[in-house]
Amino acid sequence: MPSACNIRITGQVHGVGFRHTCCRQARLLGVTGWVRNAADGTVEIHAEGMACAVEALIAWCHDGPSGAHVRDVQTNPAAETKAVTFDVRF
């Protein structure tokens, strides 16, 4: 069953390659959507795909790439946008 959610990651997540590593992970899992740095120091993600793939990306976000220190991961259901790729937004 398809699933879509918005994810917000707090902690030391800027300047550690979080966005690009997340993009690679999402593509490996078959998740579409986007990832971006927010002005408040968090990372924001919109993820769509099979529920198990989206859940796997959320699980990955709890650790992130080496160098990241994730404090919290918040998820909220979201409307599907029918994204066909996963991209880094700037």
Image (cartoon, rainbow, N blue to C red):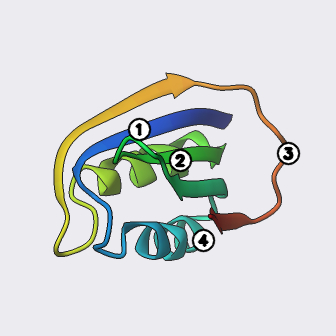
Badges 2 and 1: C-beta atoms under 8 Å apart? yes
Residue at the outermost front position = 39
Of residue 72 and residue 30, the one placed in the foreground of this image is: 72
* Lower position in the chain sequence, tag 3 or tag 1: 1
**Real-space CA distance between mark 2 and mark 1, rounded to the nearest whole angstrom:** 6 Å
What residue is disc 4 on?
Answer: 27
Callout in the foreground (3, 2): 2
In the rendered structure, find residue 8 and report the number of the disc placed on it.
1
- The picture places residue 49, in percent across and down from the top left corner, at 67, 48
Which quadrant of the rendered structure holds the N terminus? Answer: top right
Q: Amino acid at mark 3?
A: Lys
What residue is disc 3 on?
Answer: 82
Q: Is residue 65 above or below residue 50?
A: below
Mark 1 crowd level (few <14, some 14–19, many ≥20, 10 Å Cα): many
Q: Amino acid at mark 4?
A: Arg
Residue 89, image quadrant:
bottom right
Badges 4 and 3: C-beta atoms under 8 Å apart? no
Q: Amino acid at mark 2?
A: Ile
* Lower position in the chain sequence, tag 3 or tag 2: 2
Which quadrant of the rendered structure holds the C terminus? Answer: bottom right
- SS for tag 1? strand
